[in-house]
Image: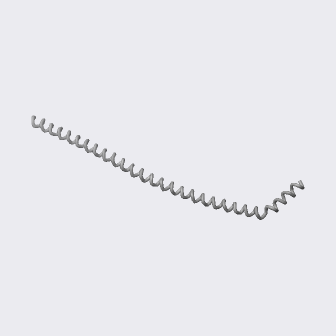
Amino acid sequence: MEQILRKLSEIEITADEILKDAERKKRALSEETERQCKEFDAVLEKETDAKIRDIRNELEKEKDSRLAALKEDTEQHLVHLDSFYKENHQRISEELFKKIITA
């Protein structure tokens, strides 16, 4: 009987050690998973920041390009208006004067 009790005690001790070992492995696995998550988050954040920087730079270039095109277009319109004024101001002034007088 004593031998059975000793064997049961050994089995209980072994089972207890197995449970403790499983708990240690579970904690280690949990810590490793947490570390990997933090590492993944850091890498993802760096990639996201880089993409945001690239998009901002691209949008800035596009804005500058559109602004330059708008300035050029405006300058062309102003040159055209100035040329039109120089060529036609006398005629337009006379037409307005006639309209004012006949009205």
Please, which colouring scheme is shown? one colour
**Residue furthest out toward the right:** 102
Residue 55 located left or right of residue 72 = left
Residue 95 placed where, x, y %?
A: 84, 59
Instruction: Give the quadrant of residue 96.
Output: bottom right
Instruction: Give the quadrant of residue 2.
Output: top left
Residue at image point 30% right, 45% down: 31
Residue 18 placed where, x, y %?
A: 21, 42
Residue 21 placed where, x, y %?
A: 22, 43
Residue 1 located left or right of residue 41 = left
Tell me if residue 8 comes above or below residue 52 in the rendering. above
**Residue furthest out toward the left:** 2
Classify the position of the N terminus by image quarter: top left
Residue at image point 60% right, 57% down: 67
Viewer-nearest residue: 17 or 78: 78
Residue 86 located left or right of residue 49 = right
Residue 11 located left or right of residue 39 = left
Residue at image point 84% right, 60% down: 94
Tell me if residue 59 comes above or below residue 14 in the rendering. below
Viewer-nearest residue: 44 or 17: 44
Instruction: Give the quadrant of residue 15.
Output: top left
Residue at image point 52% right, 57% down: 58
Residue 19 placed where, x, y %?
A: 23, 40
Q: How many marks?
A: 0
